[in-house]
């Protein structure tokens, strides 16, 4: 009885693994060793792949293909000099073997010599029968060089060779997007669809381009064609739902998001969007139910926690908002979006020390927005922490050297701390930047504002009533 190709491969693998267990030395032809090695490489079993190559070369030392597999393993292990040496020997033996040039290109690429890698791949193009694979590798090298025009051209050549190479199509669109060539992308996709009218991936990409251009009716039509081409294409339903939201057709958007939940494993994104739609429809209970499903599905998705928190903030239910933002912080205490809301909620609840802590954490985590500095400073003023407030504003001044809001606060704080010279200095700076903003001194430091000397300086810039 003759074995099928798969049965032969399985037999070879079983025989090889049996040999490893018993330490017996069995004979395999070079093709068997190649297939065994490919199997282990494809399954990420590199130690077994190395053993297969080593034993294969012991039995077939002249096998070019096995030596090329050894090179592939050496490149993976970053043993580039060893790999390069073997390739130089092989090139002398088989100058017309395209795999030698491909592996050479891999070595150049790993050394960040991408232009040399491209030259090697172009040499491989002259001798290969598999143009698509080589063009794909060239495209990746151009991406490393951030040469998106040439990368785009290379991936287009892949599609000319194989119009079902969807990874190449995605890469072409990535280049169009990076180059912000929306109209050109649509034109290219339409040409592609003339040849492949039922390609759901292409229709999906057309829809995304129109969505970015805010041409929502055209985007909707494209996603409908994607669904006609493949009625189980989850991505098309999700994108269609987003378009319907933009068109304020929230019930239809919910229907499309619900279809994705039926077709595939539920996603936090779908639950979140359904919640947003129900909130727009004033269906508060259903909105909350879906927001809770969002964070249950993915507790690390900050948009879910923020949606629940913001829902309660809009309802002025700050206690519940604080409860949920605290839960979020317990999960991810490095999320600046959580700390900003924590600070604002505590401020509304008049828990000023907690609010100050929230703004301080926001700043520590890199949120250097002027509003964050200002709000923290104002809370510190209210708490009587003038020295800390001064330090806060001096740091803010490094980021916002021309901010009247910062300068006025520094002026008031220095006067409050009996550092009059510095107070006058910052007051003059503030008035020169924006003389109308002197109201900051009046509101935050009324006693300072009523000083005769301070009013005189302000009056020299703007006539007080």
Image (tube, rainbow, N blue to C red):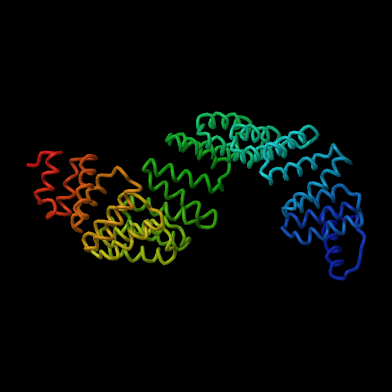
For the question of whether residue 290 can be seen, the reply is no
x and y percent of residue 115 in the render? 68, 36
Q: Position of residue 91 (x, y in %)?
A: 85, 41
Up the image or down, 30 lies above or below 18; here it is above
Say left or right for 392 vs 459. Answer: right
Residue at 75% over, 59% down: 46
Res 127 → quadrant: top right
Q: Is residue 172 left or right of residue 42?
A: left
Task: Choose between 386 and 465: the one closer to the eye.
Answer: 386
Q: Quadrant of residue 366?
A: bottom left
Location of the C terminus by quadrant is top left
Q: Is residue 159 visible from the viewing direction of this image? A: yes
**Residue drawn where x is 84% and y is 50% of the image:** 67
Residue 99, percent across and down?
Answer: 79, 42
Residue at 85% across, 59% down:
12
Screen quadrant of the N terminus: bottom right
Tally of marks: 0
Please state if 385 lies on the left or on the right of 233 as rendered.
left
Tell me: residue 260, above or below residue 347: above
Name the side, left or right, on which 211 lies relative to 439.
right
Where is residue 279? Give x, y as percent.
34, 53
Residue lying furthest bottom: 22
Q: Residue furthest front?
A: 421
């Amino acid at each position: 009885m003759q074995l099928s190709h798969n049965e032969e491969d399985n037999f070879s693998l079983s025989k090889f693994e049996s040999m490893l267990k018993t330490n017996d030395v069995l004979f395999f032809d070079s093709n068997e060793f190649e297939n065994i090695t490919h199997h282990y490489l494809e399954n990420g079993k590199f130690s077994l792949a190395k053993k297969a190559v080593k034993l294969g070369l012991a039995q077939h030392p002249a096998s070019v293909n096995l030596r090329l597999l050894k090179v592939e393993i050496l490149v993976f292990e970053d043993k580039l000099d060893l790999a390069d040496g073997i390739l130089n020997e092989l090139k002398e033996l088989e100058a017309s073997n395209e795999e030698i040039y491909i592996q050479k290109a891999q070595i150049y690429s790993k050394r960040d010599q991408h232009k040399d890698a491209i030259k090697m791949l172009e040499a491989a193009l002259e001798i290969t029968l598999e143009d698509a694979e080589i063009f794909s590798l060239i495209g990746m090298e151009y991406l490393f060089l951030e040469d998106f025009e040439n990368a785009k051209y290379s991936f287009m050549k892949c599609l000319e060779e194989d119009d079902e190479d969807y990874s190449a199509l995605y890469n072409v669109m990535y280049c169009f997007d990076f180059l912000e060539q929306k109209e050109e992308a649509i034109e290219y996709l339409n040409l592609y669809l003339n040849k492949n009218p039922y390609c759901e991936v292409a229709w999906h990409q057309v829809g995304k381009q129109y969505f970015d251009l805010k041409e929502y009716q055209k985007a909707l039509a494209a996603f409908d064609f994607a669904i006609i081409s493949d009625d189980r294409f989850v991505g098309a339903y999700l994108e269609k739902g987003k378009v319907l939201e933009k068109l304020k057709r929230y019930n239809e958007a919910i229907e499309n998001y619900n279809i994705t939940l039926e077709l595939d494993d539920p996603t936090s994104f779908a639950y979140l969007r359904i919640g947003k739609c129900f909130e727009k429809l004033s269906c508060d209970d259903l909105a909350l139910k879906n927001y809770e499903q969002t964070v249950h599905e993915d507790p690390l998705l900050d948009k879910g926690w923020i949606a629940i928190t913001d829902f309660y903030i809009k309802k002025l239910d700050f206690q519940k908002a604080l409860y949920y933002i605290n839960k979020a912080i317990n999960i991810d205490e490095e999320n600046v979006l959580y700390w900003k809301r924590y600070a604002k909620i505590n401020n509304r609840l008049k828990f000023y020390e907690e609010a100050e802590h929230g703004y301080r954490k926001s700043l520590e985590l890199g949120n250097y927005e002027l509003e964050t500095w200002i709000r923290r400073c104002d809370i510190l003023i209210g708490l009587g922490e003038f020295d800390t407030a001064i330090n806060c504003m001096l740091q803010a001044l490094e980021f916002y050297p021309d901010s009247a809001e910062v300068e006025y606060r520094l002026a008031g704080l220095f006067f409050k701390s009996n550092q009059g010279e510095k107070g006058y200095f910052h007051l003059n700076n503030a008035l020169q930047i924006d003389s109308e903003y002197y109201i900051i001194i009046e509101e935050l430091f009324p006693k300072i504002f009523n000083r005769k000397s301070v009013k005189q300086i302000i009056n020299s810039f703007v006539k007080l009533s």
